[in-house]
Image (cartoon, rainbow, N blue to C red):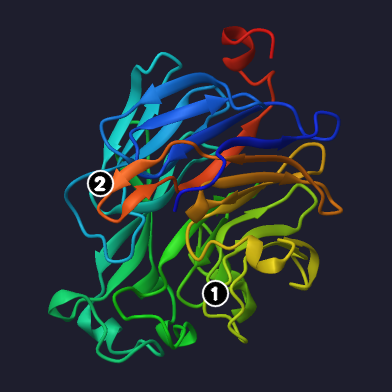
């Protein structure tokens, strides 16, 4: 979809959180660091398009995933190559697994964890509930998720497998989902205690697993989230998500960013478009709570980013101008974006007069 206007649409300098924003166009092979008015301050060039995004490490290096030509891709979000770059684009670390998809994180211990696809054993597949009958991938295959933690040498030090570490019957899929995948994990977020928060798209569920025992510690589910993305725990203890709003009761085509209470699951804050349908991304997307209390939102499908205050006022709005030609036409979609303070390592040293 072509927007009438692209680039910076609005900027309230007094109320926006000043910094730099990191953008990896979903169908391009570059990652951009832009200023508040949209000027490109720096970029990294990659061998592949992202799988699906990149972010800055505390060192200032860039951790990126790219979509390799091999491996399965049953539901979008394919990656396959993990790379850490320094500011100048030199490769500091690299790891390849063609089954990697969606999310990856540098852990507190210095290792890297990522989500991967694996074929679901037939016995486990038979225990699946919900979804459209006879909707498996070619050959009757259902793909399940695994988590793999690797050290700096590329050695596997920990794994978790959805089909064997979860009781499959407790995770029925939405009736409008296919059986190509079991759960479709699209986010993996490390908590301060080392445990892991996971987002499952196929049943609008978020869980927390104990890293040591692999058992489920907490579980939240809400069909109104509409197959959410980007779960994360905030400094105040609550959980922030991008609720995509697809296949929701009532069939309302709108997305929301929701903050809910960790203990009760009760919604304590949300943002939606005005009118509601003016913000809608049925897939990808995310949000980031900024230091000043504002929230940076990535309406991923439309390549639209907005910063809103606690009261829901837009103080910064930007539409990605990087349209890449695809077999379905020009596309400016973005999986996630991140805002960094100008004093962030590398940035303050490399870019002056921000």
Residue occupying image coordinates x 23% and y 49%: 98
What count of labels does the image hold? 2
Name above or below for residue 209 compared with residue 60.
Answer: below
Q: Is residue 222 visible?
A: no
Q: Earlier in the sequence, mark 2 or mark 1?
A: 2
> Mark 2 and mark 1: span between their CA atoms?
27 Å
Neighbour tally class for label 1: few under 14, some 14-19, many 20 plus, Cα within 10 Å: many
Position of residue 241 measured from the top left corner of the image (x, y, whole percent): 64, 60
Q: Position of residue 275 (x, y in %)?
A: 72, 66
Q: Residue at x 24, y 89 (%)?
A: 134
Circle 2 — which element? loop
Dots 2, 1 in contact, CB < 8 A? no
Q: Left or right: where does residue 41 sit relative to residue 88?
A: right
Q: In the displayed structure, does residue 147 sit left or right of residue 35?
A: left
The crowd level at tag 2 (other Cα within 10 Å; few <14, some 14-19, many 20+) is some
Label disc, if present, on residue 204 of the rendered structure: 1
Q: Is residue 199 above or below residue 52?
A: below
User: Badge 2 is on which residue?
Assistant: 97
Going by the picture, which residue comes out furthest to the left?
139
Residue ID at (40%, 23%): 44
Closer to the eye: label 2 or 1: 1
Residue 86 in picture, x, y percent from top left: 43, 18
Q: Which numbered circle lies on residue 53?
A: none
Residue 236 in view here? yes
Residue that lies at the very extreme toward the front in this rendered image:
4
Q: Say which residue appears at 47% left-offset and 82% top-offset.
A: 171
Q: Name the one closer to the observer, 109 or 244.
A: 244
Classify residue 18 as left or right of residue 67. Answer: right
Q: Position of residue 213 (x, y in %)?
A: 50, 64
Is residue 154 positioned above or below 223 on the image?
above
């Amino acid at each position: 979809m072509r927007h009438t206007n692209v680039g910076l649409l609005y900027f309230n300098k007094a109320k926006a959180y000043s910094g730099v924003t990191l953008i990896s166009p979903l169908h391009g092979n570059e990652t951009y660091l832009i200023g508040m008015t949209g000027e490109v301050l720096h970029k990294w060039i990659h061998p592949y398009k992202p799988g699906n995004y990149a972010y800055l490490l505390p060192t200032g290096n860039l951790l990126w995933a790219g979509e390799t030509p091999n491996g399965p891709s049953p539901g979008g979000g394919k990656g396959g190559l993990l790379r850490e770059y320094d500011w100048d684009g030199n490769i500091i670390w690299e790891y390849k697994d063609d089954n990697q998809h969606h999310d990856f994180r540098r852990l507190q211990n210095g290792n890297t964890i990522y989500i991967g696809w694996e074929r679901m054993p037939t016995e486990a597949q038979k225990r699946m509930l919900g979804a459209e009958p006879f909707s498996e991938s070619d050959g009757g295959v259902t793909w399940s998720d695994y988590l793999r933690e690797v050290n700096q040498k590329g050695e596997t030090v920990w794994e978790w497998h959805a089909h064997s570490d979860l009781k499959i019957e407790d995770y029925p899929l939405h009736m409008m989902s296919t059986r190509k995948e079991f759960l479709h994990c699209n986010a993996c977020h490390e908590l301060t205690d080392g445990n892991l928060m996971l987002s499952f798209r196929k049943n609008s569920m978020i869980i927390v697993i104990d890293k040591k025992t692999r058992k489920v510690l907490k579980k939240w589910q809400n069909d109104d989230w509409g197959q959410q993305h980007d779960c994360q725990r905030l400094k105040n203890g609550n959980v922030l998500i991008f609720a995509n709003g697809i296949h929701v009761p009532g069939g309302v085509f709108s997305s929301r960013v929701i903050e809910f209470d960790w203990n009760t699951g009760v919604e304590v804050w949300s943002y939606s478009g005005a009118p509601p349908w003016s913000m809608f991304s049925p897939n990808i997307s995310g949000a980031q709570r900024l230091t000043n209390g504002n929230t940076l939102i990535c309406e991923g499908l439309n390549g639209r980013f907005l910063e809103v205050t606690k009261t829901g006022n837009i103080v910064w709005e930007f539409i990605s101008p990087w349209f890449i030609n695809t077999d379905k036409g020009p596309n400016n979609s973005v999986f996630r974006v991140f805002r960094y303070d100008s004093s962030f390592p590398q940035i303050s040293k490399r870019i002056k007069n921000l």
